[in-house]
Amino acid sequence: MAVLDHLTSQQAMDLENEYGAHNYHPLPVVISRGEGVYVWDAEGKKYYDFLSAYSSLNQGHCHPKIINALVGQAQQLTLTSRAFYNDMLGRFEEFASKFFKFDKLLPMNTGAEAVETAIKICRKWAYEVNGIDENEAKIVVCENNFHGRTTTIISFSNDPVARKNFGPYTPGFIKVPYDDLESLENALKSDDTIAGFLVEPIQGEAGVYVPSDGYLRQAKALCEKYGILFIADEVQTGIGRTGQLLAVDHENVKPDMLILGKALSGGVYPVSAVLANNEIMKVIKPGNHGSTYGGNPLAAAVGMAALEVIRDENLTEKAEYLGKLFRKELNEYIANTEKVLLVRGKGLLNAIVINDDEDGDTAWNICLKLRDNGLLAKPTHGNIIRFAPPLVMTEEQIKECVSIIVNTLKEFE
Ligand SMILES: *Cc1c(COP(=O)(O)O)cnc(C)c1O
């Protein structure tokens, strides 16, 4: 069979099932084309994408400006490795550093790699600047976190499916409950080997848990009080998604280290980064860290275009406005049903909680019906469905989506 022969959806699923490792449980839909807020399956049926590759596609599918940057750069130069300079990386580093108001950027590819990078920088800073004894540094993380899939990162996950039988685990992490300042302060004051606090400003993967107002600001103040680094993992929440450029901006918090990924390329190419100021980034010296593809010219071109789209199309403001509208309209329905307990979120990162057991299958069945009705979403954990459409929506489109969602939910009453 030639590579470009048309596949039916069934054929495509059969192939993945036969030849791919079963490390995901996808919703049964095969996407073969995307444009803006829409995707089409192999049979040509059109859907609203309400997941956006876990908030990677804030700029919408195949944004022409980003694709142009990709194609143009692909015809010039794609990869040099960091053994040599290239004429794109510095431009991207300057652009993104100024965009997010940090001195410096360290480029990687995936979100998990950027989290690993931040952990390494934090530890090195602890020994070389903060005077912690070698191999003693600890990082405080939150319960129910999601930061990626590497061995070190799953070491501080508390999802048994993500962890079990992948040990031995990396030591040096302390878990505290999310949105709990007292536990955080207790951890910080009882141990002088703590180097940093790694936190998601909204816990996306866990089910779009929005912490109490003031949590991030006060957590940052505690980090300052105890002289440790506040590290924001904005891989999912950043780049306009929550109605501010960064979710920490809702509380005017400036992290010591910022971790970005996903929408940093608008879903076009793996681009991630850690940003920090000089007094922290200076601990990284040649040979300490790297990646063959990290900071390649294609990534740099795509990353710049992706951020320009966010700025030029006012996508942050759109997320804020459309998110309010979305929650208001869903709340009108929720007030009159037993089926859905609540909608929560910020900007266009939202979730509904279905009135069902954590291990019930209603949320999954609702997502199958949403698919039939032309909208793609997926449960996060059990009874929670995340809604994260591209930010390039119109008001008319989001209203149509709300009516698809509400009509689908009514089928389950
Ligand atoms: C998706 C995600 C990651 C991991 O990114 P990958 O590109 O999948 O490695 C890390 N942190 C958060 C908050 C995420 O949502």
Image (tube, rainbow, N blue to C red):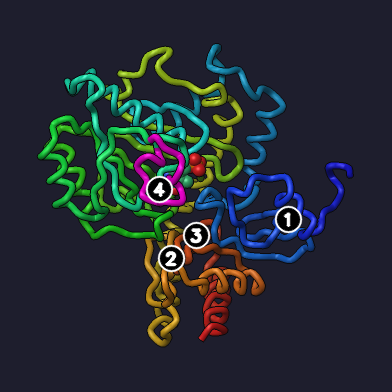
Kind of residue at disc 3: Ala
Q: Which residues make up the magenta segment?
A: 153-168
Query: Marks 2 and 3, how far apart in space?
Result: 8 Å
Kind of residue at disc 1: Met
Query: Marks 1 and 3, how far apart in space?
Result: 24 Å
Q: How many marks?
A: 4
Q: Name the residue under label 3.
A: 388
- Nearer to us: label 2 or label 3: 2
Q: Does the residue labelled 4 lie within 8 Å of ligand 1?
A: yes
Mark with earlier residue (4, 2): 4
Q: Is residue 254 visible?
A: no
Mark with earlier residue (3, 4): 4
Q: Mark 1 points at which residue?
A: 13
Check the image and report above or below for 60 versus 93: below
Expressed as whole percent of the image width and height from the top left, the position of residue 148 reads 45, 42
Q: What element carries label 3?
A: loop
Expressed as whole percent of the image width and height from the top left, the position of residue 413 reads 51, 86
Is 16 left or right of 147, judged from the image as shown? right
Q: Mark 4 points at which residue?
A: 146
Check the image and report above or below for 342 versus 86: below
Residue at 45% from the left image edge and 81% from the top image edge = 339
Mark with earlier residue (4, 1): 1
Q: Nearer the viewer, residue 280 or 297?
A: 280
